[in-house]
Image (cartoon, rainbow, N blue to C red):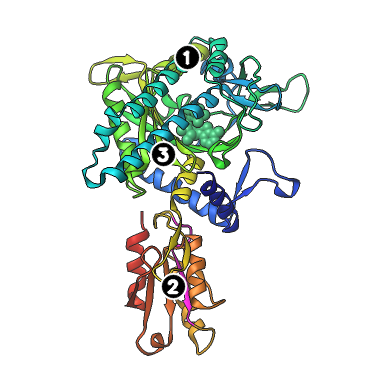
Amino acid sequence: NEDQFKKVISHAKEYGYVFQSSEIYDGLSAVYDYAQNGVELKNNIREYWWKAMVQMHDNIVGIDAAIFMHPTTWKASGHVDAFNDPLIDNKDSKKRYRADVLVEDYVGKLDAKIEKEVAKAAKRFGDAFDKEQFVNTNPRVVGYKEKGEAILKRLGQSLEKEDLADVKALIEELEIACPESGSRNWTDVKQFNLMFGTKLGASADSAMDLYLRPETAQGIFVNFLNVQKTGRMKIPFGIAQTGKAFRNEIVARQFIFRMREFEQMEMQYFIKPGTQKEWYETWKETRLKWHLSLGMGEDNYRFHDHEKLAHYADAAADIEFRFPFGFKELEGIHSRTDFDLSQHEEYSGKKLRYFDPETNESYVPYVLETSIGLDRMFLAVFSKSLKEETLEDGSERTVLALPAVLAPTKAAVLPLIKRDGLPEVAKKLVEELKWDFNVAYDEKDAVGRRYRRQDAAGTPFCITVDHQTLEDETVTIRHRDTMEQQRVKISEVREIIKKEVDM
Ligand code: ATP
């Protein structure tokens, strides 16, 4: 809900995770900077993805292609002609929206109504509650569901046919109002290209018009044959990449969910034509498992199979996540056929074929793609981890229960008090541990307050040095989520923590 989302945004700033870009100049809309803790969390998410995709698959390799690409790339890929969003203005408020997002938000409200009915019924029926049966038979819920599906289907069909008048008609029929002013006075729907243009070269007549890449995928397609040959890759194989992408988004709200400059983590898997259905299912499953491995709750994910397919795809699904503002796309799994490679063959005049040594055939491979926004993943992890808890003694605490493998700082070392030689012992421990992971040292304020500070910053372990340490070389390790403390030998600390935080 909205309050929780506001807390997420203010917590991200207060604890050094995300700042508005150019804040002293009042910021730049939908552009954000990652702060001292944010950059660590972001790096860790990227590494967690890279290890799972590249290190753990012996047939997937990585590249890092340039952001600038030859401009013909974007003609071939279809982005010059078709990378558009349907835009609509409200005549009274002069605000601009994405027409499809307005409709999707309307359907999101129906989803919220369904969830409310389910929660009510679960309370009423207690243990006997069968959610699936309820959702499939309760007339009100079935009504909402059918209505939502019909709306999305019509939206998909109108967009596919480029029937923008029907998109407007849909908005009017649903009586969708401008969120700010409540006005229903809409303009016609227009298409708007999302690519940012720029120029390469200094002299006016020889300067070349370029685009900032709106997706990382094309850097992989144009390098497909280079990688295949130099890496002697055999199909099926994958190429993975993480990097910045740029889109001049119309609706730039919802914090780092939708940014104008963002980072993608993509993998294109090159396969034999005809095998795309199997690989589509395999990668859907593989990617969902990756998400679940972080332990953020199975209920917070769902698949959404696309009705409306992009110009390059023969099947597509999103992995949606329960963000504070509802279920939204976190990752896309797309069966891209041979669209991209064939287009690049045509536009470049170069063959982009794979020669299969077993069958002696050559063909343009099909591509299965997994594409996730790093910033969106950051928001998913951060928002799901932020919790307000009421403790047994009635006091409250704020805890950022980040998965330990992703936490920016793995442990804080705290001398119980600032004298008697405790700080020296604590600092020595910091010096030892910092070779293996990020550690913080904190000696300011009472130890209880320091624990709370580390809880809110997301640090999974606090190591406290006290007077007993001086006698028997033991310390306490306090676990952020359970607040339990265990007494262990100093010599064991590294291994205990490494076991929890190593990827
Ligand atoms: P949406 O429908 O939300 O605009 P999309 O379907 O255009 O997203 P893709 O082109 O499939 O997104 O991009 C793959 C992934 O990149 C998305 O699942 C999302 O996580 C991320 N992404 C796309 N656009 C943005 C953006 N403007 N800001 C942050 N992340 C983004």
Q: Earlier in the sequence, mark 1 or mark 3?
A: 3
Residue at left offset 36%, top offset 84%: 473
* Residue range highlighted in magenta: 407-416
Tag 3: amino acid: Phe
Q: Is 376 placed left or right of 301 in the picture? A: right
Q: Is residue 247 magenta?
A: no
Q: Which residue is mark 2?
A: 432
Q: Is mark 1 within 8 Å of ligand 1?
A: no
Q: Could you say whether the residue bearing mark 1 is in a helix, strand or loop?
A: helix
Residue extending farthest to the front is: 124
Indicate the position of residue 362 as horizontal and vertical percent values: 32, 15
Tell me how far mark 1 sits from mark 3, CA to CA. 33 Å
Q: Nearer the viewer, residue 139 or 475?
A: 139
Residue at left offset 27%, top offset 28%: 137
Residue 343, disc? 1
Indicate the position of residue 187 as horizontal and vertical percent values: 66, 17
